[in-house]
Image: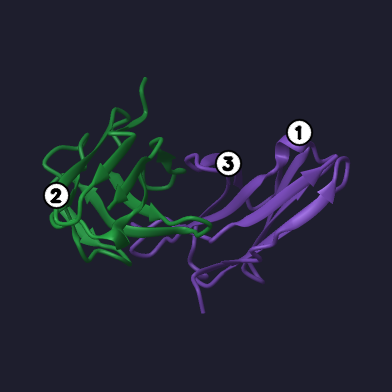
Amino acid sequence: RKEVEQDPGPFNVPEGATVAFNCTYSNSASQSFFWYRQDCRKEPKLLMSVYSSGNEDGRFTAQLNRASQYISLLIRDSKLSDSATYLCVVNPNTGGFKTIFGAGTRLFVKA
Amino acid sequence: NAGVTQTPKFRILKIGQSMTLQCTQDMNHNYMYWYRQDPGMGLKLIYYSVGAGITDKGEVPNGYNVSRSTTEDFPLRLELAAPSQTSVYFCASRLQSTEAFFGQGTRLTVV
């Protein structure tokens, strides 16, 4: 089992749609969780951290479910500019030197 | 505050040549990482370092070497370039429990 798993997609949605991505992780001792966005041929950039209580930033909502070991990202009112690859990222706690990246979920938002 | 700086941005190497990809960060981060990303694929960890003088192998270390003589610098060395090393290389850094910050990447082509 991979340490961090994501559905690669692609997700093709119309503008204005709501889309959700899930990501599962294998290390139950993991402590820090993030969603990154990567545009084509660019470096990954932090979209938002994921907190135990869930958190929201504008149209984006992230949630953590420790019992089931998954995190989610919800994008409301999708914009064309949301088209990108979304990476799930986990920092393990024990021996937590390696930042573990999921392979990414590709999103295409169409007019 | 420059963040993570990678040089060069682009490079074409002939098979068998060697080169050093430079990475420097000015955020006093202890953890630093080198990843490679092939077209349409996720990030693969090459090497990482948890502090000056300490380095360790990631998933795909063969054909590469690193050193960490200072907190700021984490160069990646290719000794005998091969076509399989054609990729985009990203350097990243972070503190223990925070998100990772990425450089803009080095696009390397080996011909």
Residue where numbered disc 1 is placed: A58
Residue holding disc 2: B18
The correct choice, above or below, for A29 with respect to A48 in the image is below
Residue, disc 3: A39
Q: Depth-wise, is mark 1 or mark 2 nearer the camera? A: 2
Please rate how many residues cluster around mark 3, counting C-alpha atoms within 10 Å: few if below 14, some from 14 to 19, many from 20: some
Which colour assignment does the render follow? by chain
Asked if badges 3 and 2 are on one and the same chain, I answer no
Q: Chain of mark 1?
A: A
Disc 1 to disc 3, how far (Cα)?
Answer: 20 Å
Q: Are marks 1 and 2 on the same chain?
A: no
- Residue B89, numbered label: none
The residue that appears at 78% across and 45% down in the rendered structure is A109
Residue toward you, A44 or A51: A44
**Quick one: label 2, few (<14), some, or many (20+) residues within 10 Å?**
few
Percent coordinates x, y for residue A52 in the rendering: 64, 53
Give the chain ID for the green colour.
Answer: B
The earlier-in-sequence mark between 1 and 3 is 3
* Quarter-of-image position of residue A91: bottom left
Q: Nearer the viewer, mark 3 or mark 2?
A: 2
Identify by letter the chain in purple.
A
